[in-house]
Image (tube, grey):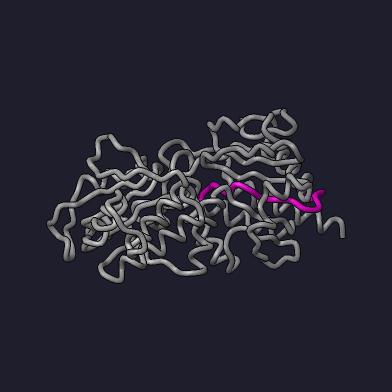
Amino acid sequence: MAAWVKGGATDADAAVEAAATLLASARNAVLAGLCAELSAVRAAYHLADALGASVDPVAGPSLYAELGPLSRTGAMTTTPAEAIGRADAVLIVGNVPWDRPIVGDIAGSQATRGRAAGSERVILSLGGPRNGATRHVAYPVEAGGLAVSIAHLRAFLKGNLAGEAAYADLAKRLSSAQYGVVLYDPAEIGELGVEMLTGLIKDLNEATRFFGLSLADPFQGRALLQLAAWTTGQAPRVGFGRHVPEHDPWRFDSARQIAAGEADAALWLASLPAPRPDWLGTLPSVAIVGVGSPDASGDVADVVFAVGVPGESAGGSLWDERRAAIAYAPASGQTAELSAAGILTAIQERLTLKKAAAC
């Protein structure tokens, strides 16, 4: 079954009518998650505008960990292809990056372009695992966490701290690189860590070439960020209460709004896997989730749709981390009956009809 209303299986048209009625009766709705193909995210923004609702992606914490430092100080960045092709030294910060394919790509190759071509690649780890299949030099994280560790490393690099400490050795290794790359996950190191790391990279560029390569979150945040920019001219957390996009990362945080009682209805969009929020089902809600998802059942929200999963049971434009770009992912199996973009568009059309009838 592809749709449920109040726990009972139904057809898509009846579920669309129920969803439109639920959202139309709300004074302040939130559209959250947005972990989906770009066509669905675009349709969600259009629906939010029609409702006067706010938008908050599940990728928000990762995106905003970088957006703040980027807006204040800028950044010196590179791409996966450049890192693999040019880097003779790669510093991997934290634990999260080690589970990503790019670490294997880096470890299994050497620089083939630029000044470092043909030289042996050194892989360094700050606060990451000490053992494993990838050979690397590991440096422990300090008690204050990754952000404090990065700050101390920067102090050693600038000569503000000295001695035989491990970070002094790491600073020397980084300074001797011909083309260095720092690989990190923004959500893991946080906004302060990103700001410290950005400063560290700028300091290194006073003597050599060094760049940052942040990992994309697993919830399509990078693709969403680009769509938000070309659709609204703003970062993702926006509200359409006055039918113009108003950006405010604190005000339009969906969890904060719901906890404060400011929102009285919600739509959760996750055609790709994403952690279901604790608040879903605590207020009138609509859920659009992928076919086969554990959340594709009638007890998740008042109205539930099971739609095609992009790259599996539906085609869609998604973030490709290896290319660092948006790319189309065709369906790899049988196409699902419903699509997230189609459901969102149908809800918006039903809302338009309800407004016309009310006039």
The answer to whether 304 is drawn above or below residue 68 in the figure is above
The magenta region covers 23-37
Q: Quadrant of the N terminus?
A: top right
Is residue 34 highlighted in magenta? Answer: yes
Q: Which residue shows up at 75% across the image and 57% down it? A: 352
Instruction: Quadrant for residue 353, please give it.
Output: bottom right
Q: How many marks?
A: 0
The answer to whether 14 is drawn above or below residue 162 in the figure is above
At which x and y percent is residue 10? Answer: 70, 32
At which x and y percent is residue 56? Answer: 63, 52
Is 79 on the left-hand or right-hand side of 23? Answer: left
Q: Is residue 33 visible?
A: yes
Nearer to us in this view, 216 or 302: 216
The answer to whether 281 is drawn above or below residue 241 in the figure is above
At which x and y percent is residue 341? Answer: 58, 50
Q: Quadrant of the C terminus?
A: bottom right
Nearer to us in this view, 273 or 169: 169
